[in-house]
Amino acid sequence: MPKNPTNTPLVSVIIPTYNRAWCLKKAVDSVLKQDFKDFELIVVDDGSTDDTQTLLKPYAGALKLIQQPHSGVSAARNKGIAVASSSLIAFLDSDDYWYPKKLSTQMEFFKKNPDAMVCQTEEIWIRNGRRVNPMKKHRKLSGMIFTPSLELCLISPSAVVMRKNIFTKVNTFDESLPACEDYDLWLRITCRYPVYLIDTPLIVKTGGHEDQLSRAPGLDKYRIYALKKILQGDFLTEPQIQDTEAVLKKKCKIYADGCEKHGRRTVAAYYYRLAEDIENKMKEETKPEDEAEEDF
């Protein structure tokens, strides 16, 4: 990449963190060791009560530290987006880390693809200190990936670089969601824009620790919320609406079955009714016109 002629860095890297002093150094160091240097590093400390502040003191001058009361990962990422000075945004979760060519590879991609809004890289998974292979359903795709993204999250925040102006079109992370906030955002993005994949593992995602958000119970409840929300907006085409309704009905039934199994019958009844309402709506939408007129 040519040298940036302005004083504005080409990419802003945002690391949200909360009580992650045990792993934050590795994440920060992996950014500072990038072979691409035209970036700013923003660490948003979301009200940590551990040794995070002490850990970050030696990095004064190498990063911009933002502190806020504990408000959740969405609020932390959104704060980073708000203060970022670059036109490109990269996220890195504080329990993940990058390989040295991560940014340079993605910057080269955007140079060659000026119309692209989002790209991500492949990744390596480490669980409880051991490398594991993702299941086939987690395989990353490239292009218009909205429909497969309905079932589960196919984009990793730590793997993404995206244009900052995309947030003016789809909004930022939903701060009301305690989990699946990335799933919610990716739906709003993938229904409108292709997400390109660089098929090289350039990040390491770690997991298995107790504070991992993706281990939180009842994640389908938050995915159901995200699916309902996007259906209520004006984001989707008619085929996308049909695909979303089908997945929403399926997830409602699965979540209701789980609630029923654990004796939460009132909650189960609500999600069974929701699934039934969606099924009835889908039947109405697929009726031939003459049959619909007779009902009227």
Image: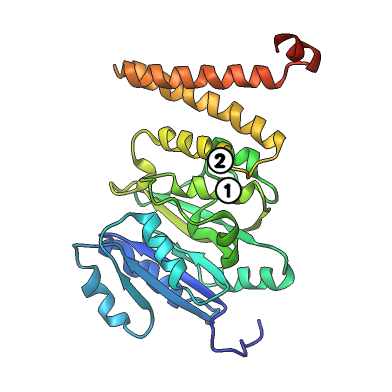
Dot 1: what SS?
Answer: helix
Please state if 156 lies on the left or on the right of 78 as rendered: right
The residue at which mark 1 appears reads as 188
Judged from the image, the secondary structure of the residue bearing numbered disc 2 is: helix
Q: Quadrant of residue 257?
A: top left
Q: Residues within 10 Å of mark 1 (few under 14, many from 20)?
A: many
Question: In the image, which disc is placed on residue 94?
Answer: none
Quadrant into which the N terminus falls: bottom right
Earlier along the polypeptide chain: callout 1 or callout 2?
1
State whether residue 112 appears in this view.
yes
Q: Position of residue 33 (x, y in %)?
A: 46, 77
Q: Can you say whether 197 is above or below 250 in the image? A: below
Q: Is residue 60 above or below residue 241?
A: below
Residue in the picture at 71% in, 34% down? 239
Q: CA distance from mark 1 to mark 2?
A: 7 Å
- In this picture, is 34 found above or below 277? below
- The kind of residue on which mark 2 rests is Ile
Q: Which residue is rendered at x = 54% and y = 79% of the image?
A: 35
Q: Is residue 183 left or right of residue 106?
A: left
Which quarter of the rendering shows the C terminus? top right
Q: How far from the left and from the top, in percent, is residue 138?
A: 55, 42
Q: Is residue 191 above or below residue 198?
A: above
Q: Residue at x 54, y 29 (%)?
A: 248
Q: Is residue 208 left or right of residue 40?
A: left
Identified by mark 1, the residue type is Arg
Residue toward you, 14 or 142: 14
Task: Residue lying at the far top in this picture: please name it.
Answer: 294
Look at mark 2 in the image and give the residue it sits on: 230
